[in-house]
Amino acid sequence: MTVQTNVDWQSDDTGTHRFFTKPIKKSPQDDRDYRLVRLENGLEAMLVHDPKADKAAASLDVAVGHLHDPNDMPGLAHFCEHLLFMGTEQYPGENEYSEYLSKNNGYSNAFTGTSNTNYFFTVATNALPVRELNAVDSEHKKNHQSDVWRIFQLNKHLSREGHVWNKFGSGNRDSLSKVGRELKAQGNGANGSADFKTPDGSLAATPLPSRVPSPAPSVNSGLELEGDGGVVGRETRRRLVEWWTKEYSANRMRLCVVGKEPLDEMAAMVSKLFSPIVNRGIDPLPTIHEHPFGPNEMGTLVSVQTVMAFHAVEISFPFPYQPPYWHHQPGHFLGHFVGHEGPGSLHSYLKQKGWIIALSAGPQSLSRGFAMFKVTLRLTQDGFDNYRAVSLAVFNYLSLLRASEFPAWYQKELATIKSTRFRFAEKRRPEDYALWVTEQLTWPVPREEVLSAPQVISEWDEVDPMKEGGGEKEMREMLSVLRVDRVRSVLMARKDEHERLSGGEKKWESEPWYGTGYTVERYDAEFVKEAEGPNTLKELRLPGPNEFVPTKLDVDKREVDQPAKRPHLIRETALSSLWHKKDDQFWVPRAQVIIDIRSPIANESARAAVMTRLYAELVTDALTEFSYDADLAGLNYNFGQHSLGVFVTLNGYNDKLHVLAHHVFEKAKTLQVTPDRLNLKKEEMKRDWENFFLDQPVRISDYLARYLFAQQDWTLIEKLTELATITPEEVQQHISKFLSKVHMRVLVVGNMYKNEAIHLTETVEQTLQSSALPADQVIELSLAPEPSTNTILSAPIPNPNEVNSALTYFVHTGSILDPRQRVTSALTAQILSEPAFNVLRTREQLGYIVSCTEWQLPGASERGLRIAVQSERAPAYLEERVDAFLEEMKAKIADMEESEFEAQRGGLEKKWREKVKNMSEETNRYWPHIDSGHLDFLRRDTNVEVLQTITKQDVIDFFMTYIHPSSPSRAKVSVHMQSRKPRPKKIDAAALPAMAELASSRGAAGLPQGWSDELTTEGEASLDAVLTFWKTTLAKPESGVSPDVVEEVLAGITTIADAHLAASQRDGTIAASATVLTDPKTLKAKLRPSSPPKPVVEWGDLPTSRF
């Protein structure tokens, strides 16, 4: 790391810290003040004073991650991260900290990386339970069918022997409790003493609130029947505290605090709060220099079985860790060329061959000290069949780069693009920014450049770029390591696809944590020879200059007292309405444009919906080469489908936005549908839609609920049925029919004047040449359950290997257009949200994914409360627990102190008063009101006014009318997605003594000491393990049981087991009042449609419209 001299640091007058004396280099656009301080304990903190802030945030980054786990306890760093949110000395209650944040329009989160752990939160300005093993275990099971996690762990598994990269970072119950279970089996509980404390006596064995039972308990939640988890729990905790004491140290911590307080005040606060952290005198930035790929790992091809149906190849090379090369960023330079999508690029060549869907390339940091250069290619079916040729094309392009001259303008162009982006960088949300800053504080750069170094790059040395530090020299050295003898490729597809390609069954191995099937083979000599040779593909060439780099960056800054609160309608015709707001607060040379093109043709049938999606995909596909340079230069577009038609978004530097817009709409109008590109898009869509059903169960349950509540929608099954037979001619006709008669809604926000926005809209209209369609013929309506109904849609999880089930539980809470009902609904949802997580996830341990939020239904006229749970438990049981939670909340709301109610109300007010942080947020705040047709731009102000009049009794009445299960008028729909994978049967631990008594009555003697403890976890035992134990034990000659009665004893043991099924085996009971359906369309027919939308306010921006 670059180290400043003591001259660069000066002691503060208080003597509590030192501060960095040089000014921090920042964007000219950045109006925040910065101060870098270093506490006496070594903790470094960046203080950010933002006088305009209405939210504060902080992030603490600890320079230790899962690569520092003990070898015998994989996942301990991740476990520690979980537990530090469960209660502290200041907030001892399990959810006290999160409850405080929730009441103050904030939230917190954390993540564990390979070499760091980050904790962050945001909050309005001025404002260790062992069972968490279950949360870690549930998180692992959530990821068990995820190809991303499976392949990530496989790559770690296939690293050089003894390397820390091999570790299993997320952990699960088995990996974290193994040491404790082994200690327990040895009959040694001394190290797991319940009285164990850290050297300073701080951490209690288990915070008291974690032992408080649920008012409507589900299952026992301790590791054993003891509140602190018994021997296993105490030993796990002992090892955790031991590890924390060793690895967490003040000198390993980087902090960033963002707030509106003066810097002196922030410095005093940080010194007071963080100085007590102990500096243990350990390595402040532990770095791993040895790469996990050695000679045995390089030069190989790994074939891996995927869960989802897709084809990909990832080509990886060991690569230098990039932060030390921040000045010229050579890895970024190489990634720019290999990942380019313009004419002559590797992407262009492979796309024209019909072999790839997508390509990405660049350096990837794996941990502090080592990295990879990765080329990832999403393949078509034909591309998978020709994966060798695809891979050789990559090596051909690398050969081209090695043989090429690189004029200095290439680096200059990249430097210009980055410096322009840095110059006009807009603010991010404070929590995102604080997190980013803490991670950059670990970079080995001069402290004054800690913000700028990651975001800008320097041009190469003008005189001699090949000298040491000249820029090109480092790039050439890194390019030289991208060779076939250093490569490891991972070929991804389902098992049957691999074996079809290889012409027979393969000899598969299995990764130990996820069970992922794989094979490893070395590249053959012929492949190596071709890959080492010169480029033979004449289609490949280096890109030319980027014509989209902006040159006009002027901003007409006119100070205003207050930014305008809404856009204005500046043009309205029979064909379109145009809303516009000139930037009056961010002062950047950018604009955001949304153009919504609507037609009833777009979604009139499932077939039409598929063709509209194909139209959007084909336009995007056809524009790839043209638009790539624009994207690099900070000018982006999106052409997508929605339920009423297609939308186009344009955003970026307004200098050349009109050029991009012209090309996008010209292509949209003149697109020629060819069989080859259509077939590839059909293949891609088919794969995506089929793979969706292998996604997280809660995503599927939410999808089905969303489908139910949309009046005009089609299931993915219906769309897949139509997809196969759609022809190019049919799509071409559909496009013409769709564009023949439309209605458009347009929003322009940013550095564009009215006349420019009008000219842009007129250009679009002239290009498309569409006839006008009345706006009221293309509106979106929702469906909602009737009052006094309780309906359940039940369906099996499509993935037979998915262990989790899911519940989406929805109650309709009325019209969004009624201000009082809308505000009461939002306040009630806020009050319920944090307790739902605490009760259903933390206390009852139902699963890793628990969420309680408001749902806005399609058309934005109706809303409701949605509670979602993903769990190994059955959906009927989950619904029981949700009902029990709502019953508990009835009493909680009724007993709520007035001060707490005021805090909840204040938190919601802060949320509605929160200012937009950048132009994108501003645009997204306006667009929903234009999209819905309600035009209620000042809704937040209205909400705040109404909120002041809402009382606790209003919330109680609302809750009891719309949400509580006892309400006779409640309108409720839930979706039950049931896992098809049988759960291992478990029995209550109380059955084991009864079994022993039965065996003893038949002569059994000398049972192994501690046998029942060995079989028991969380007060339950696996039935298979129990039966195996008894069969093995009774079969021994010394068991004392006569062979002729063994079968009788085993039958009796089975009877006892049947009578003592574990509480966790209960599937729950569906309420008698519920109607259970299995057909979505039948349920949908029982729902009522919403009213057509209409403006809430007539703004009168234009003379009375004729349309």
Image: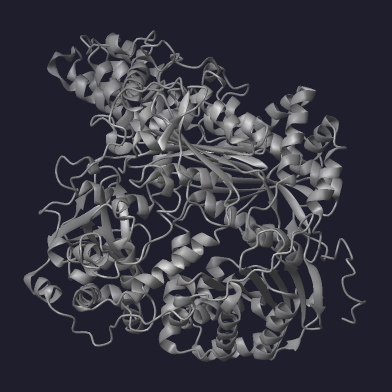
- Residue 984 can be seen in this image: no
Question: Residue at left 19%, top 55%?
Answer: 508
Above or below for 1003 versus 1083: above
Q: Quadrant of the C terminus?
A: bottom right
Q: What residue is shown at x 72% (from left), y 48% (from top)? A: 864
Quadrant position of residue 360:
bottom left
Outermost residue toward the left?
525
Horizontal and vertical percent for residue 222? 45, 21
Q: Nearer the viewer, residue 1056 or 129?
A: 129
The quadrant where residue 970 appears: top right
Give residue 577's quadrant in the image. bottom right
The number of numbered badges drawn on the structure is 0
Vertical position of residue 258 compared to residue 412: above or below = above
Quarter placement of the N terminus: top left
- For the rendered model, the colour scheme is one colour
Q: Is residue 456 left or right of residue 908?
A: left
Residue at 41% x, 30% y is 43
Measured from the top left, where is residue 1084 in percent x and y?
69, 60
- In the image, residue 460 above or below residue 1042: below
Horizontal and vertical percent for residue 219?
A: 51, 25
Residue that lies at the very extreme toward the right in this rendered image:
1104
Can residue 363 be spotted in the picture? Answer: yes
In depth, the one of 576 and 1060 nearer the eye is 576
Picture coordinates of residue 325, whole percent (x, y): 29, 55
On the picture, is 321 further left or further right than 22?
Answer: left
Viewer-nearest residue: 817 or 843: 817
